[in-house]
């Protein structure tokens, strides 16, 4: 299988959900990769289009689409029906999934090394809400705030997470 800028190689890995992902290889130098350069992992050719690129240990699967001049790199995961487009960059340990739609860097953010386990907290817009992922928690910003207040009531981590929540509210104009 071939696209404008890359092919799927025979190198693959099975992700945590049992999905077979193929490493990509650049076949025509462009903005993010040189001819012959190996990239990240995708489930199928349809996951990546335009001048978008996946690199490092990043993974794209399901019906997710990375398009335009978007980049997914590091250990980031994009899956489900998520769309990453435009000049958006998803990286680090970020997860974008479900019905998330990231069309620019204003649609998501992450906070690293906070809380009781120094976890990364990833936040992104969906069509109907602001979604927060932190450790095993996944839910809306309101659900996250409620969980923080219940789990960390009165301790130093409650203060850290509540400060993060205020930044999230300011960023997404809530």
Image: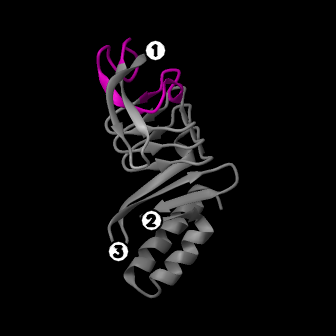
Specify the segment rendered in magenta: 26-53
Mark 2 touches mark 1? (CB < 8 Å) = no
Residue drawn at (40%, 77%), measured in percent from left and top? 157
Residue 21: image location, x then y, percent: 40, 34
At label 1, counting other C-alpha atoms closer than 10 Å, the crowd grade (few under 14, some 14-19, many 20 or more) is few
Whole-Å distance between the Cαs marked 2 and 1? 37 Å
- Residue 12, quarter of picture: top left
SS for callout 1? loop
SS for callout 2? loop
Residue drawn at (35%, 45%), measured in percent from left and top? 75
Please tell me whether mark 1 or mark 3 is closer to you in this view. Answer: 1
Q: Where is the C terminus found, in terms of image quarters?
A: bottom right
Q: What residue is shown with label 2?
A: 136
Q: Is residue 166 above or below residue 110?
A: below
Please tell me whether mark 2 or mark 3 is closer to you in this view. Answer: 2
Q: What residue is shown with label 1?
A: 2
Whole-Å distance between the Cαs marked 1 and 3? 45 Å
Whole-Å distance between the Cαs marked 2 and 3? 13 Å
At label 2, counting other C-alpha atoms closer than 10 Å, the crowd grade (few under 14, some 14-19, many 20 or more) is few
Residue drawn at (35%, 74%), measured in percent from left and top? 116
Residue 35 lies in the magenta stretch: yes
The one nearer the camera, 100 or 123, is 100
Residue 158: image location, x then y, percent: 45, 79
Q: What residue is shown with label 3?
A: 116
At label 3, counting other C-alpha atoms closer than 10 Å, the crowd grade (few under 14, some 14-19, many 20 or more) is few
- Residue 154, quarter of picture: bottom left
| Disc sitting over residue 114 in the figure | none
Q: Main secondary structure of the magenta part?
A: loop
């Amino acid at each position: 299988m071939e696209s404008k800028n890359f092919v799927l190689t025979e190198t693959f890995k099975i992700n945590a959900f049992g999905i077979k992902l193929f490493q990509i290889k650049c076949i025509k130098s462009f903005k993010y990769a040189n001819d012959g350069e190996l990239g990240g992992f995708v489930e199928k050719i349809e996951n990546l289009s335009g001048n978008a690129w996946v690199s490092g240990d990043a993974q794209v699967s399901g019906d997710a689409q990375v398009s335009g001049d978007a980049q997914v790199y590091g250990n980031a995961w994009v899956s489900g029906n998520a769309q990453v487009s435009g000049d958006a960059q998803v990286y680090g340990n970020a997860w974008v999934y479900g019905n998330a739609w990231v069309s620019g860097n204003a649609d998501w953010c992450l906070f690293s090394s906070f809380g009781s386990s120094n976890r990364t907290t990833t936040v992104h817009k969906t069509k109907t809400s602001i979604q927060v992922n932190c450790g095993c928690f996944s839910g809306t910003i309101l659900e996250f705030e409620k969980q923080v207040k219940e789990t960390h009531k009165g301790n130093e981590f409650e203060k850290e997470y509540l400060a993060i929540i205020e930044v999230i509210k300011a960023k997404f104009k809530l």
